[in-house]
Amino acid sequence: MSQIDHYAVFGSPIEHSKSPRIHTLFAEQTQQLMEYSTQLVSAEKFPRAVKDFFSSGGRGLNCTVPLKELAWEYAKLKTERAELAKAVNTLAVQADGRILGDNTDGIGLVTDIQNNHGISLKQKRILILGAGGASRGIILPILEQLPLSMTIANRTVAKAVTLADEFCHKAKINACGYDALKGQSFDLILNATSASLTDELPPLAAGLLAEQGSCYDLAYANKATAFVRWGYEQHASNSLDGLGMLVEQAAEAFYLWRGMRPDTLPVIQILEAERNS
Ligand code: NDP
């Protein structure tokens, strides 16, 4: 008899998570016998919960706020992108029983921008707003696309400087506060701050976005975020939010677990329709 493989997302809060919906759609599409659940897990409970999950036969986990750094500590075996990100959002049981930690957020973002929206990152001047966990996860996958330059701007400037230093063996990254951006312009501005979650906007000067430039907010909501609206005001060629990134990072996790790539576009379309309904 075929056995159902178990997967889950751990986090706190977790009830808002779209991951069960996305992975259920992937499983239906690819005819995989799997079940994906949510589990409310605090940072304190994480070590016990993750041990219980895998010892009872669980095949893979996603970890979200506030657990990504703890998942990084837990996984002794990690991909390079996860190692550098210092955050793990996907855990997968390997053939030899070891648990691999990966960070699929950055590749999810790059895939959404390049494949779904046709925006090449090569030779582009890229500005990343924010220097938290999400910024850390996207830097290496973006650098691998060979942009012309990368700048990180953050409210707390020291955090941007530290982050740039951590990746200086890969490429030169500029780091600064928002004031220092005046007079510069960028082909792509990525909002990796959590400001959108409270409908706020970092202090962005007019003229930051080059003609034909694009804006991308890693956050997503049922209506246009403050940053997506700012992009419209700047006449951005594209002003996008992070729903596509969410689906693409899930597809990368699914690939790690099941060895097959789901077709993401129909799933993005379903989620778009559901959030507009
Ligand atoms: P963190 O808490 O690690 O970092 C938050 C960052 O936002 C910090 O740099 C902080 O600056 C900055 N910030 C917060 N509020 C403001 C404000 N009002 N003005 C300017 N800067 C501000 O969060 P994460 O990095 O984990 O998440 C960032 C965003 O990315 C969230 O919106 C999250 O939802 C999104 N995300 C989306 C994913 C997707 O799949 N679409 C995946 C992962 C994340 P300071 O250092 O000065 O405090």
Image (cartoon, grey):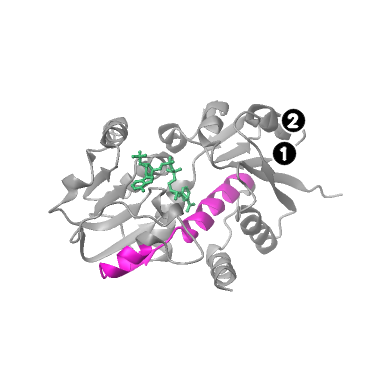
Residue 269: horizontal and vertical position, in percent?
54, 70
Which amino acid, by three-letter code, is at mark 2? Ser
Is residue 237 among what the camera can see?
no
Residue 124: horizontal and vertical position, in percent?
24, 55
Whether 241 is among the magenta residues is yes
Tell me the crowding category of disc 1: few under 14, some 14 to 19, or many 20 or more residues within 10 angstroms, Cα based. Answer: some
171 or 156, nearer to the observer: 156
The vertical placement of 58 against 221, above or below, is above
The vertical placement of 113 against 93, above or below, is below
The vertical placement of 23 against 6, above or below, is below
Q: CA distance from mark 1 to mark 2?
A: 7 Å
The label on residue 58 is 1
* Image side of residue 255 versus residue 34, left or right: left
* Image side of residue 59 versus residue 217, left or right: right
Which contiguous range is marked in magenta? 228-257
178 or 46, nearer to the observer: 178
The label on residue 55 is 2
- The residue shown at (58%, 49%) is 255
In terms of secondary structure, where does tag 1 sit? loop
* Image side of residue 84 versus residue 99, left or right: left
- The residue shown at (65%, 51%) is 15
Tell me the crowding category of disc 2: few under 14, some 14 to 19, or many 20 or more residues within 10 angstroms, Cα based. Answer: few
Residue 98: horizontal and vertical position, in percent?
63, 29
- Residue 159 picture quarter: top left
Q: Quadrant of the C terminus?
A: bottom right
- The residue shown at (54%, 41%) is 65
